[in-house]
Amino acid sequence: MKVLVTGGAGYIGSHTTVSLIENGFDVVVVDNFSNSKEKVLERLKTITNKEIKCYKVDCCDYEELRKVFVNEQIDAVIHFAGYKAVGESVRLPLMYYQNNLDSLLTTVKLMLEFKVNNLVFSSSATVYGKPKSVPIYEDFPLSVTNPYGRTKLMIEEILADVTKANSFFKVAILRYFNPIGAHESGLLGEDPEGIPNNLMPYITQVCIGKLPKINVFGNDYDTIDGTGVRDYIHVMDLAYGHVLALNKLSSSKDNYLVYNLGTGKGTSVLELINAMQEVVNKPIPYEIVERRPGDIDCCYANCDKAFNELGFKAKYNIHDMCETSWNFQVKNPKGIL
Ligand code: WQD
């Protein structure tokens, strides 16, 4: 089975490509490298011992993306391609709506044209907004507070309409909680441009001396120690969740499936810093500062549906996530060059 992975050179896309190949799928990658490095393809070859075909194409470019569908016998698509920085989306909403919606719409249009009927879409727990309680279930109310999150929610709704209109077209929506960690080889990992927005790459850059200290965004939240609680999931667990979702689509009679991909456990900022201190074996400097606008107190998943319907269960723990994130950072002090 040949899977087209859009955004396949990115953090989650590259790890998912490894998991797909390890599970017997053929993969074709499409990436415009706007937020990833071409070097990742060489690293994927080293890890998988396979030459992975990659097209440098922007998914918004119908003519160029159509050539991929003409050249390749694609059986399914996993769509990662899109911008994903919350803060940037607030500053540049039009760029986010145009890119994230257009890349999805162009991809689905071509899927329908070429009768490629199985799609896994990379969504996010951000669609739950500030949940009424935790753990979060898939049928919780959806509300978004930033343009990035709104593109995810809009795309979920677009795909609901497309599957209603085309019963043969099947979609699995995967709502990621907080992906962290890296492939055990240290060849792949989260490799943000500039100052990291997300916590884990920020921590590893402090540990390697690239940044002076961690700014902990508030310690007056209604949580175990006052700092923000999130459901961190190892990127390799997340990657395997996509394999299970593809398998489910092949056999499912329902054509619009939604799953939380998390661990079902919450970890606070200070707990994550402590876990990393055990890995790097030295104190990690941090300072409690003001809350970051838009952050919520606590967010973690109920994962029963993914377990019962996909057989999905995260196997890596916080220590594994810290260890592999650190290993990637040590092996790539200046990121993937
Ligand atoms: C985690 C916790 C912060 C940085 C976002 C997006 C989500 C997904 C994952 C794309 C929070 C705290 C963070 C720092 C800190 N992105 N923090 N100091 O905000 O839960 O989710 O990234 O799909 O859609 O919303 O992740 O890693 O930014 O923050 O104290 O320098 O760490 O307040 O409690 P978040 P995060």
Image (spheres, rainbow, N blue to C red):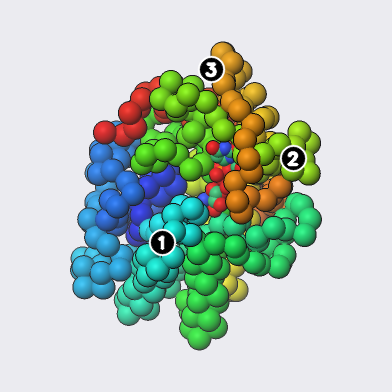
Report whether 34 appears left or right of 19: left
x then y, percent, for residue 198: 51, 41
Nearer-the-camera pick, 1 or 176:
176
Disc assigned to residue 220: 2
Q: Are discs 1 and 2 less than 8 Å apart at CB?
A: no
Indicate the position of residue 147 as horizontal and vertical percent values: 50, 64
| Residue furthest bottom in the image | 165
Quadrant for ligand 1? top right
Cα gap from disc 2 to disc 3, whole angstroms: 27 Å
Task: Examine the rendering and report whether any part of residue 319 can be seen.
Answer: no
Residue 83 visible to an observer of this rendering: yes
Closest to the observer: 215 or 258? 215
Mark 3 — residue?
A: 280
The residue under label 2 is which amino acid type? Answer: Asp
Asked if residue 266 lies left or right of residue 335, the reply is right
Numbered mark located on residue 247 in the image: none
What's the CA distance linking mark 1 and mark 2? Answer: 30 Å
**Disc 1 crowd, CA 10 A, few/some/many (<14, 14-19, 20+):** few
The answer to which of marks 1 and 2 sits earlier in the sequence is 1
Disc 2 residue lies near ligand 1 with CB under 8 A: no
Do residues under tags 3 and 1 come within 8 Å of each other at their CB atoms? Answer: no
Mark nearer the N terminus (2 vs 3): 2
Residue found at x 31% / y 65%: 59
Query: Residue flagged by tag 1: what amino acid is it?
Result: Leu
Q: Which mark is residue 92?
A: 1
Q: Amino acid at mark 3?
A: Val
Mark 2 surroundings within 10 Å by alpha-carbon count, few (fewer than 14), some (14 through 19), many (20 or more) = some
Mark with earlier residue (3, 1): 1
Please state the horizontal and vertical placement of residue 204, each as a whole percent of the image. Answer: 48, 28
Count of marks, rendered view: 3
